[in-house]
Image (cartoon, rainbow, N blue to C red):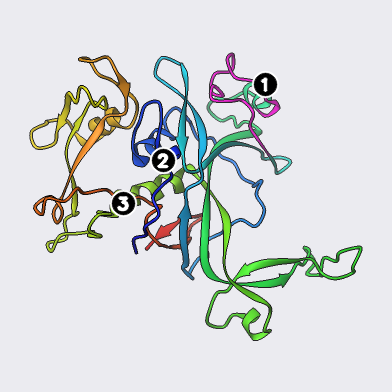
Amino acid sequence: MYGKTAVPEAVMQNAYGGTLSQRAANATRRRPSRGGGGEYWADTFKPHETVPANVRLIPVPCVAHRVDDAGNIYEENIPWKEFREHYHGTFRRSAICSGGPLFFDRNRRTACYGCDIFWSSPSGKGKRRPISMSDKYAFAALVMDPFHKVPQVDDRGQFQLNPQTQQPFTKWERCLGQGCPHCRSALENVQGRIQPWIMSKGHFTNLNAYSDRLGCLTCGGRATPDNRPVITTALWQCGNPACRQLIFDMGSTTATLEQIQGVVNKPYTCPVCQTTAYPEEVIQCANCTPAGQVPQRATIFDVDLQVIAPKTGDNEQTMLM
């Protein structure tokens, strides 16, 4: 289901331009994942294994610090929050990294106790550092399902009581529908809550790969009658409006998709005008282009999502429907 609310212009503007898809791909460059666990957010959204949640992502203006191929730091506006987490496997405790965008350079990073432990620990074949480092991504998620107000319990199943009122602390839990015990108990409920949705790099990559298949925001189309994507890329060109030098013509290029993505998903320096910016994608829509309308790619902020997280072995895999 397509919505009418566009991503705020302040979120869309960047020194190097670029679409949400390009910036999402760039967010995972030069950021090696090294395990982790834990959280720093209250009332987080956690997808259920089997019961889909109805979710709408809300763009929130944030700034990320990136590092270009020359090692220079630049800012990028994004509609989600990024942070890095250290996790100590022995103590099972975690903390947010303060190493900054140059965290991967032990000599140029900013002060961080977690990084101190990480870099001072021996590594290599057969060795494992006691502390890990991993990237996390936080989205504002409007979970549109009913929620019940549920008493909190401790590890022993006992109510956690407020020492001043002697009443149980409460939390909001999403209703799971058929057979929900909270419905049978007639607990207080509300329709929908905004919750932070924290995800790993793997889930973040899956989410943005899904966005490439959402279709056209102008006409609402997703696929052609023969099940091909309604939106296709015609070409990639220089992001400078005064230049528009051709980079890839998708109808004639011999470059592979991997080679193309390696160029277009990061700031590109045009050999003609010397402007450094994300390449601009020129798209075609099977419905809009023949009708003389301007197509526009839908993003993950333009659609309603149904989300589950089935377990696969020892891990969870977020699935979107």
Location of the C terminus (image quadrant): bottom left
Q: Position of residue 23 (x, y in %)?
A: 39, 36
- Mark nearer the viewer, 3 or 1: 3
How far apart are labels 3 and 1 at the CA level? Answer: 40 Å
Residue type (three-letter) at the residue carrying disc 3: Ala
Q: Mark 1 — residue?
A: 111
Q: Mark 2 — residue?
A: 9
Q: Mark 3 — residue?
A: 298
Task: Tell me the SS state at disc 1.
Answer: loop
Give me the residue at 40% from left, 34% from top: 13
**Is the residue marked by circle 1 packed among few (<14), some (14-19), or many (20+) residues within 10 Å?**
some
Q: Position of residue 66 (x, y in %)?
A: 47, 26
Task: Tell me the SS state at disc 2.
Answer: helix
Classify residue 118 as left or right of residue 3: right
> Which residues are the magenta region?
95-114
Residue type (three-letter) at the residue carrying disc 2: Glu
Q: Is residue 110 above or below residue 98?
A: above
Is 77 or 254 nearer to us in this picture? 77
Classify residue 316 as left or right of residue 181: left
Classify residue 246 as left or right of residue 212: left
**Is the residue marked by circle 2 packed among few (<14), some (14-19), or many (20+) residues within 10 Å?**
few
Is 112 or 3 nearer to us in this picture? 3
Is 168 or 124 nearer to us in this picture? 168
Q: Position of residue 223 (x, y in %)?
A: 19, 59
What secondary structure is the stretch in magenta mostly built from?
Answer: loop
